[in-house]
Amino acid sequence: MSIATLTWTRGVRDLPVELDARWQTAAPATRLRWQLGTFAAVALIAYHYSLSSLVANVDLSTPLAYIGLVPGIALALAAARARPLKREPAIHDRQLDYIVGIPLIAAAAVIDVLLPYKYSDLFWVWRLDLVSFPLFVAGAVALIFGTRVLWRQKLAVSYLLLAWPLPYSFLLLSVLNAFTNLTIDALRAMVNVVHVASFTNASGGEVFNVVHHGASFQLSVVSACSGVDGVVGFLLVASAFSALVTGPRLLKFIWLAGGMLLLWVQNLGRILFIFWAGRVFGEHVAISILHPFAGLVTFSICVLVMILVMGSFRLRINVGEPLNPAEKAARNIPGPGQHLAVKSFYPVAGLLAVVALLLGVNNAGLRQFNLVSDASGGAKLASYSADPAKPVGWDVTYETSYTWAQPYFGDGSTWLRYEYVPAGGGNLHANLPVTADVVNTTSVQSFSAYSVQACYNFHGYKIRDLANVALGGGIRGQALSYSTSTNGDWTIVYWVWPVKDSARTNTGATHYERVILYIQNSPQTRVRAPGVTTGITNISGSLNPAIAADEQLLAERTYIVDFARQVIQAQSKIKPGSKFVRTVTNEPGLIVPGGNAPTGTGQLNERRAVVLPVAFLNLKTNAERLAYKKSHPEQFLPRLIKQG
């Protein structure tokens, strides 16, 4: 070994010792700046997209807009509890820091890396990334500052859990309609006095007409504008203050209730101001300029007012009393010149930097879920049950519904069957139709209890292969091929996604749908598709492309996966609220939709639809139905259907 190599090896070996010595001899202010900077950097890198999605919601009119304030409020709580306080445990064990911190970091990594593959788009709907964030922060605090500081900051770290939107969704849905109706009733009474707008009975009684220079436009007051967002925001701020504020409990409750009432009243004033601005300056100024920011400004003013009047309620902010020097010495809490709680910092900082980079790359991948869900976990897609999308070159018709499954998937659930038939064009071609079964329910757990594979196994079907598939928009499904003793072989793909409940779009309710696409396998089946095989990972069974029958199943699997991807992309372009007509008339057939309903209209007075002939419905196989359609095309032309 050369002298240069020996010197380099010794330098590397001695580097940790030298870094620790520099760290221990550095000024306390320097150490604190390095600790704070490292903590801020790793937290922002690891969760940059999650945090930016929260902040982006603050100036939007959504019921959960102000949960984006939670990280900032948590920082304020941390600053308020920055100093050592009385009754604080004297923890100076670096091994304990590792025992506490590393498992917390590992738990956060497991949630962020593994669960998106398990739960697909539901990971973002449930915003599980915001469950892992407090775990990561707690682990980083333990490793960077020590367990003693983590104990001191337990309130601030725990407060981060309030950024998780899922619990609010369950609680708000039960009161949202009543709150919205109360706001609308109050506005109706107020516009009769101030005359900045007029109430109309259109669209279910939630529309106000505003007239600007003789031209009128309509403004709708929905749940997002009802003021519930301000009440939720004030509760978030007040819950933080409640941990720091001391005073009589009754007066604290009165202060809290008064703040909620003030926020609701200011929201009424905000809406009237927007009505007035629309009347004087026009729709563009009212909606595009004032509406996005007025709520945040008035909310901030009201919170400031409530803080300023705290003294009138005999409430005061108490951040605790720091220990005096004698108490510090008695409790052996290190002061200047004494031993450090964190003697070795740079190795931990390097480890956290690597973990943060890996989690940051994974966090950036959550952007893919924007197709199906917004930042608060609300569904963005129109219900497939109400308005199924179709790939280019295909038509979709309603076949039937099954009511016997409600005991399995819950009251109010639906199971509908549609059929796709070729119409010419596009890059998906087959000589047989594609069948779609869709179950719509509010109980997403029922899909696990009554899974597709369990159903097929129960009926004795033979599963030939099973594969995980990436379908786009963060949606992951499964494709499988199976054989039956009487009904032939089939290739299917299925997935679960959140959708807006088109019957109650004003409540923001989220339903879940399991969509299953089928195509029958037979010697005559011919399919042709782009053939994108990426994103298909076999997990059970095997198909041998050297065997002709297996080669056909592989081709059909690729085809049905491509079909599903195009359905998902087309569904993302449909506006929630349009509906299919699925009513039986006196005509000898069943009315089915002839195309997607116009968007933005809700209920329609008339539309074109197809009336399926009884002879067609009596046919048993898809091949017979396809032959019938080809020989009787005039019976499948859309007719004008009146709606009551």
Image (cartoon, helix red, strand yellow):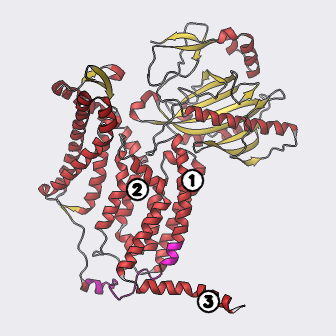
Residue type (three-letter) at the residue carrying disc 3? Arg
Percent position (x, y) of residue 626? 73, 18
Q: Which residue is mark 2?
A: 161
With respect to residue 91, does 473 lie above or below? above
With respect to residue 310, does 287 lie above or below? above
Percent position (x, y) of residue 59? 35, 44
Residue occupying the point 53% across, 40% down: 371
Q: Main secondary structure of the magenta part?
A: loop
Q: Which residue is mark 3?
A: 10
Q: Which residue is mark 1?
A: 115
- Viewed as shown, does residue 586 lie left or right of 162? right
Q: Foreground: 364 or 100? A: 364
CA neighbours of label 2 inside 10 A, class few (<14), some (14 to 19), many (20+)? some
CA neighbours of label 1 inside 10 A, class few (<14), some (14 to 19), many (20+)? some
Residue occupying the point 25% across, 58% down: 242
In reply to whether residue 134 is colored magenta, the answer given is no
Q: Are marks 1 and 2 in contact (CB under 8 Å)?
A: no
Q: Quadrant of the C terminus?
A: top left
Query: In terms of secondary structure, where does tag 1 sit?
Result: helix
Q: Report the span colored magenta.
A: 327-350
The reply to whether residue 175 is in sight is: no
Q: Foreground: 448 or 529? A: 529
Query: In terms of secondary structure, where does tag 3 sit?
Result: helix
Residue type (three-letter) at the residue carrying disc 2? Leu
Percent position (x, y) of residue 253? 20, 51
